[in-house]
Image (spheres, rainbow, N blue to C red):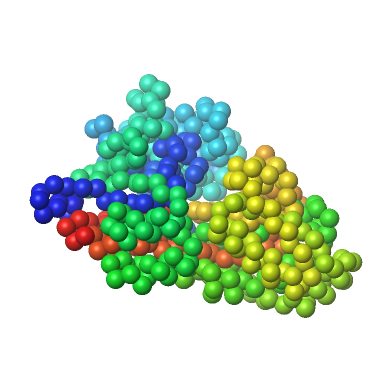
Amino acid sequence: MAGCQPDGSSRSLIFAVAQAPVNLDPRFATDAASERINRLIYQRLVEFDASSHEVPGLATWQMLDALHYRFQLTQSAVFHDGKSLTAADVKATYESLLQLKNSPHTAEFRHIEHISTPDAKTIDFALSHPDPHFAARLMVGILPAHLIANGHDFGHQPVGSGPFKLDHWQAELQLKRLSDGLTVRFEEVKDPNVRVLKLKRGEADLIQGDLPPELVKYLQKQSNVTVNTGIGANYSYLGLNVQADFLRDVRVRRAIAHAIDTRAIIDKVMVSHSRQANAILPPEHYAGNAALEPYAYQPALARQLLQSAGVKLPLTLIYKTSTDPQRVRLATILQAQMQEAGIDLQIKSLDWGTFFADVQKGNFQIYGLTWVGIKTPEIYSKVFASSSLPPQGFNRGRYQDPVLDQLLRKEDWPAVTSRLHSELPVIPLWYEGQFAAYRNTIVSYRPMPDGNWDGLTKVVFNPAAN
C-alpha cells in the first residue's frame, strides 16, 4: 500500500538518516548515503549474490578471449524519462566515465581500450590487458546517453531506470517508488539521540544503522518500535604505519593484536550480531577464510612480545580517530585495554576532513576506520600490494612484502589471508552487525549485511497505523 491516511490524504515514509546524500551521479558518488540512494535510482550491468559472486543485473556476459568481454542486455529497462535503455546508453556511460578527470572511479576502467555496440542489446569491451575480474567492476549505474550528451546534472537531478525516481530535492530528498507511487523522504538528522526521539514520537518511520548500541537497546524496549538485526559485512580495523618506529616489527604488531579484548568490546558496546573479524572479507564470502583463528586477548603475552622486540615499556603510540562520539568511545576502550599490555595509547581525535586527509597522506602511527561495501577480493591487492602505495592504491600503511606480492599475483586467497593474518599490516577488529528500527507504520523491513537500503523497494507502508 502506498500510504493513504484515513482522511484520504497521503504522506511520505520518513527515513531519518545520519547523513544526507551528496552527489547522485553514480560516476562521482563516494559517500555511503549517495551510494545507497543510487542503488535505488539506477540499474547496473552486474549485481552480487549472498557469497559476493557476480551475477547478472541488466545483462549477462561472456569472456570472448582474455581481452574481450561481451555483455547482452536481458532486461527491458526504461529510464525515468520514458526512453528505453539500450546498449548505446551503456557505451555512453562508461565512455563518459573514462573521459572524466575528477571521478574517483575512473581509474578502475583505464584498461578499457574500446567499447562497441554491434546491436541495441550487445556491448563489447576491448581491454588493454587481461582482467579476470572485469565483470565485477561494472557496478556503475547506467545513465541515458542523450542526457550525457547534453551535460545533464545527474548529481542533483538523477535520471535512472531503477525502482525509484526523483520526486523532488529541495531541503530534503524525496523519491517515488514506480511500482505503487510510495514516496520516501530522507530527512538528515545528524544527532543519534534526536533520530531516536523522532522515531519514538512518530516524526520518523524508519532509521537504520549509525546508532550507538545503548540507543539500539533502548529502542528494543519501546512498545511501538520494531528492531530487526542481522549480520554485517562492513570491516572495522586498526590501520598501522609499518614504516614507523617499532611498528615495522611484526612482534609489536602481534602484541597490539593480543592487547585488544575484541570479544569484550563486541559483547558490551557493539550492536548484536557483530562478529570478530580476521580478514577484510567475511567468512561467507567466496574468498573468505573461516579457518583463521582470532588473536586472543593476552596482555601478558603482548608484554613479552614487546620486550622481545627491544621495546622499553610503556610503548607510546598515537591513535588517530574522528570526533564521532562512538569512535572516540571505542578509542578510550582500546586505550584502557592496552595499558595492561604495556602500551600507552594516546588518542588524537580530529574533524573528519583533517583525520581522513592524514590517513590518505600516511600521516599516522595507528588509526581506526571501516571498509564499507567491499565485494571483490581484489581489495587485498589495492590495500596491501607493494605497487599500491598512494596514489596508485590504498596501501596507506606502506606495507611491502614480496611473499604476499607473489600470492596476490596468483590470487591464492586462502594463502593471502593467512599471510596477512600472520604479518598483521592492519589489526582486524569486527564486522559490525546491522539493524533497522521502525514504527508500526512499516511492515517487515530487514537490514542488509552491507547496510544498503534496498529493503525500500519492497517495504509495505501504512501511515494509518501510526
Residue 395 drawn at (x, y percent)? 69, 48
Relative height, residue 351 to residue 120 (above, below): below
Q: Which quarter of the figure is the N terminus placed in?
A: bottom left
Residue lying at 40% horizontally and 40% vertically, measured from the top left: 141
In the rendered image of this protein, does residue 148 appear above or below residue 422? Answer: above
Direction left: furthest residue: 7
**Residue 373 showing in the rendered view:** yes
Residue 198: image x %, image y %? 34, 56
Residue 230 screen position, x and y as percent = 42, 67
* Number of dots carrying numbers: 0
- Residue 431 vs residue 229: left or right? right
Name, please, the residue furthest toward the top: 150
Residue 282 percent location from the top left of the image: 54, 64
Depicted 123 relative to depicted 410: above or below: above
Q: Residue at x 75, y 74 (%)?
A: 340
Name the residue at 41% across, 29% down. Answer: 92
Which corner quadrant of the image does residue 252 belong to? bottom right
> Image quadrant for the C terminus?
bottom left
Instruction: Please tell me in which quadrant of the rendered image residue 388 appears.
Output: top right
Instruction: Give me the residue at 16% from left, 57% from top.
Output: 464
Using the rendered image of the protein, determine whether residue 402 is visible from the camera's viewpoint: no
- Quick check: 26 left or right of 393? left
